[in-house]
Amino acid sequence: MEHRPLIERSTHLSVQGLRTRVEVTGDGPPLLLLNGIWGELAAWHRLQPYLGGFRTISFDGPGIGDTEIPPYPMSLPALARFALAVLDAVGEPKAHVLGVSFGGIVAQQVATVAPYRVDRLVLVSTSSGLVYLPGQPAALLHLMSPLPTDRAGTAAGRTFGGRIRRDPAVLERLRLAPPRSVEAYWHRLSGLTGWWGVPWSIRQPTLVLTGDDDPIVPAANSRILASLIPGARLEVIPGGGHLMLFDSPAEVGPRVAAFLGGAAAGGWTDKLAS
């Protein structure tokens, strides 16, 4: 079977009329990557070496990185439809979907509004969107500030926990950036509105991953989320923080790849919630 040509560097495609930065790497079953509220596609570069055997599809969300700001704020269902339009733009009718943090909520929406287009689902450092146990107030305020400061100092550790708590300088290497303008900030926050669908309507095989040192989305949220999705599997990473997918890819990436590849549960060295 003839393989599709690969995009080894980011390119720009028209997605719902917006000039959108998209990157496709690797070969194999397609895997759509949905980042957090401020994350740009470059953040995935640390994880991708551990996702061998998959054709990863990443993009800058509307108003993030090198993607245009939409003419109007986009709700959560609209962001899900935008993600599906990215799949259309690269010629994929169906894919695995991996969402982290805010991207995990978008991923749930994608699985709800277009279940026939999602194979397996991985939700990392996220919540159900319906029931949410708040994180530490200082961490949330620092994350949601339109102009974050001290991102590589002690505040970084208190905000993201995990490895960054132990070594705040790691954050500088993760290619995460605040919104480039206040307009982009408000547009992105609009994605927190318009929830449609419920986790228990998700029928795809689902892996829920969380760290036990996440100040932004405490692990209890993932336990709730996993309990709401029929048949979902929960893994708790000891010492993992909110950004464990990016700051500890060697530990987390193989777990994601094993699940997406259909590895038997008995072969995993995971830690399950009771």
Image: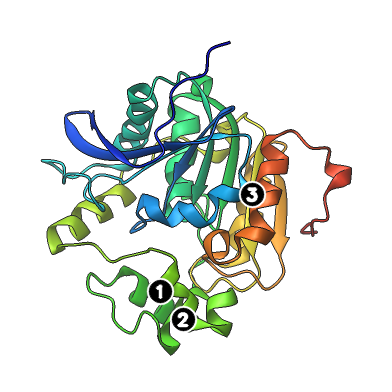
Write down the residue under mark 3: 208
Residue shown at 57% from the left, 64% from the top? 244
Q: Residue 214 lies in what quarter of the image?
A: bottom right
Crowding at label 1, few (<14), some or many (≥20) Cα neighbours within 10 Å? few
Q: Is residue 209 left or right of residue 43?
A: right
Q: Position of residue 186 (x, y in %)?
A: 19, 57
How many numbered circles are shown?
Answer: 3
Residue 6, numbered circle: none
Q: Is residue 123 left or right of residue 34?
A: right
Considering every residue shown, the one lying at the far bottom of the view is 154
Helix or strand or loop: what does disc 2 sit on? helix
Helix or strand or loop: what does disc 3 sit on? strand
- Kind of residue at badge 2: Ala
Considering every residue shown, the one lying at the far top of the view is 1
Distance between mark 1 and mark 2 Cα atoms: 6 Å
- Kind of residue at badge 3: Val
Q: Are marks 1 and 3 in contact (CB under 8 Å)?
A: no
Helix or strand or loop: what does disc 1 sit on? helix
Write down the residue under mark 2: 169
Crowding at label 3, few (<14), some or many (≥20) Cα neighbours within 10 Å? many
- Kind of residue at badge 1: Glu
Write down the residue under mark 1: 172
Q: Are marks 1 and 2 in contact (CB under 8 Å)?
A: yes
Q: Residue 262 lies in what quarter of the image?
A: top right
* Residue 29 vs residue 269, the one in the foreground: 29
What sort of colour scheme is used for the picture?
rainbow
Sequence-first tag of 3 and 2: 2
Q: Quadrant of the C terminus?
A: bottom right
Q: Position of residue 57 (x, y in %)?
A: 44, 36
Distance between mark 3 and mark 2 Cα atoms: 27 Å
Q: Quadrant of the N terminus?
A: top right
Q: In the rendered view, tell whether residue 6 sits above or below residue 273.
A: above
